Amino acid sequence: MSLIRILIADDFEAWRRKVCLLLRRRPELQVVCEASDGSEAVQKADDLKPDLIVLDIGLPKLNGIEAARRIRQLCPNSKILFLSQNNDLEVVKEALGTGALGFVYKMNAQKELLSAIEAVLLGKQFVGSGLTGWN
């Protein structure tokens, strides 16, 4: 089983710690880097070319949606999954419009993040529950 290299971008260190702990349940998931703002996420993604990038939307310096657009250009083979406390339908649509394959509402991360990662890595779209008005 090959390792899945993951970059986590979120401005709250405590939240990044929670995500890392959750990912440790799956030994093939390896967090190779963490970023605390959108600019850093773009730079680290370009440097490391991770398999998966877990992005928050409300990032300082460069929001997650703009960061995702730039990452798609620099790292077309990296998959992007949004993990956000924003569950507004228009924001979800805009986020997925960047080429990201997944969107998980932070309140549901405990039960949905690992399933979302699995789907996204297989090239399938995953939109979690708790996202109002999503089809």
Image (tube, grey):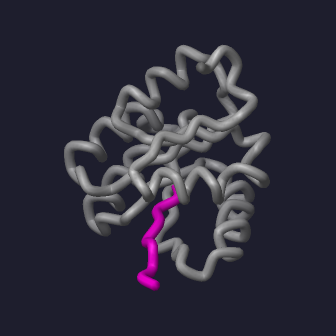
Q: Position of residue 101 (x, y in %)?
A: 44, 41
Check the image and report above or below for 79 versus 94.
below
Q: Position of residue 7 (x, y in %)?
A: 46, 62
At horizontal 68% and vertical 61% (from top left) the residue drawn is: 19
- In the rendered view, does 130 fall on the left or right side of 120? right
Q: Where is residue 134 in the image (x, y as percent from the top left)?
A: 61, 20
Q: Which of 58 and 96 is in front in this view?
A: 96
Q: How many labels does the image show?
A: 0
At horizontal 31% and vertical 36% (from top left) the residue drawn is: 69
Queried whether the magenta region covers residue 96, the answer comes back as: no
At horizontal 74% and vertical 58% (from top left) the residue drawn is: 14
Q: Which of 68 and 59 is in front in this view?
A: 68
Q: Position of residue 64 (x, y in %)?
A: 46, 37
Secondary structure predominantly adopted by residues drawn in magenta? strand
Q: Nearer the viewer, residue 22 or 115?
A: 115
Quadrant of the rendered image containing residue 53: bottom left
Check the image and report above or below for 51 versus 134.
below
Q: Which residue lies furthest to the bottom in this view?
A: 1
At horizontal 46% and vertical 29% (from top left) the residue drawn is: 95
- Magenta part of the protein: which range? 1-8
Quadrant of the rendered image containing residue 97: top left
